[in-house]
Image (cartoon, grey):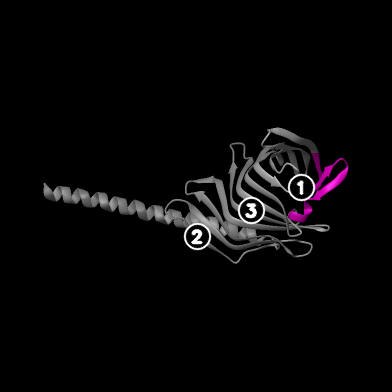
Amino acid sequence: MKLEKIFSFRIIISLILIILLLYSGYWLVVSNILKKTISNELNKNDYINFKDLSISGFPTQIQTNIHKFKILDSMSSNEILESDLIKVSMHPFDSSKIALKSDIINILINNDALTLNVALDKSLSLLSIDNSGYININLAIEDIIVLGNEINIASLEQIHIKLNETSFKNFKINSKINFARLETLESQDVSIKIDGNLKLNNNAFDGNLNLSVKELKLNEEIFNIPLTIKKNQVIFLFMNVFDLNRILSFL
C-alpha cells in the first residue's frame, strides 16, 4: 500500500515537472518571437535607435525590455524622444493585447522660436485588437511637466487618452487631464478635455477636435474651442497653431 502511494506520488511529481518544462519551453519560444518581432519593427526605421533588447517576466508576463530607446527627427537627426527603458509585455496566451510601460519619457519639440521640453512620468499604454480587427489604444500618464524655453509653463496630472479605430484608419479620440496647472492662465488649476475624430492618410492626420478647459475650484468652463487638423497642421480660426510634423517626422 505504501509503495503504491509512493509510486502515485512520483507520477504526480513527474507530470508536474513535464508540464513545467513544456510551459517553460513555450514561454521561451513566444518571448523570443516577441523580441524578434520588436527588433525587426524597430530596425525598419532609420530614425529609431536603441541599445539592446532583453527578456524578463517569467513565469507570468512575457516582457521585452527596450534599453536606451530614442526617436530622431528625420529632417535634422536631432533627438525628439528618449527613454532609458521601455517595457513591452503581453500575456503568454493572448497576443491581441500589448502593454508598454516606462517610468520616464523625455520629448524635445522645436517649434519656430519655441523649444518645448516635455517629461512624462510613469506612462502605461495598452494596445488591443478587437473582434473586427481594429486597434484600440489606452494611454495613462501619471504626470507631465512642460517647459517652454526652459520656463515651466504647465504641470499636468492624471492624464488618460483613448484612441479607438472605428473604421479603417479612422479613429475616435477621447482624452482628459484631470488636473493641470497652467502658468499662462489667471486661474491656474484646471481640467482639460480633448475629443474628436481623426483620419490617418499617408502618415498624416486629418480631423476635427474640440478643446475644453474647466476651472476646478468653481467647476466652471473657461473656454471651449474647435480645432481642425489638416495634414498634421493644427488649425484654429484659419491659423496654424502647431505643426505635428515636428513630433511625427520619423514616421
Q: In the image, what residue type sits under mark 3?
A: Leu
Cα–Cα gap, marks 1 and 2: 44 Å
Find residue 248 and report its horizontal and vertical position in percent: 74, 54
Circle 1: is it few (<14), some (14-19), or many (20+) Cα within 10 Å? few
Local SS, label 1: loop
Q: Is residue 239 magenta?
A: yes
| Image: magenta residue range | 227-247
| 153 horizontally vs 24: left or right | right
User: Mark 1 = which residue?
Assistant: 184
Q: In the image, what residue type sits under mark 1?
A: Thr
Find residue 186 and report its horizontal and vertical position in percent: 75, 43
Q: In the image, what residue type sits under mark 2?
A: Ile
| 241 horizontally vs 90: left or right | right
Circle 3: is it few (<14), some (14-19), or many (20+) Cα within 10 Å? some
Q: Main secondary structure of the magenta part?
A: strand
| 119 horizontally vs 245: left or right | left
Label placed on residue 55 = 2
Cα–Cα gap, marks 1 and 3: 20 Å
**What residue is shown at x 73% (from left), y 41% (from top)?**
187
Q: Earlier in the sequence, mark 1 or mark 2?
A: 2
**What residue is shown at x 38% (from left), y 53% (from top)?**
22
**What residue is shown at x 83% (from left), y 44% (from top)?**
235
As displayed, is residue 118 above or below residue 190?
below
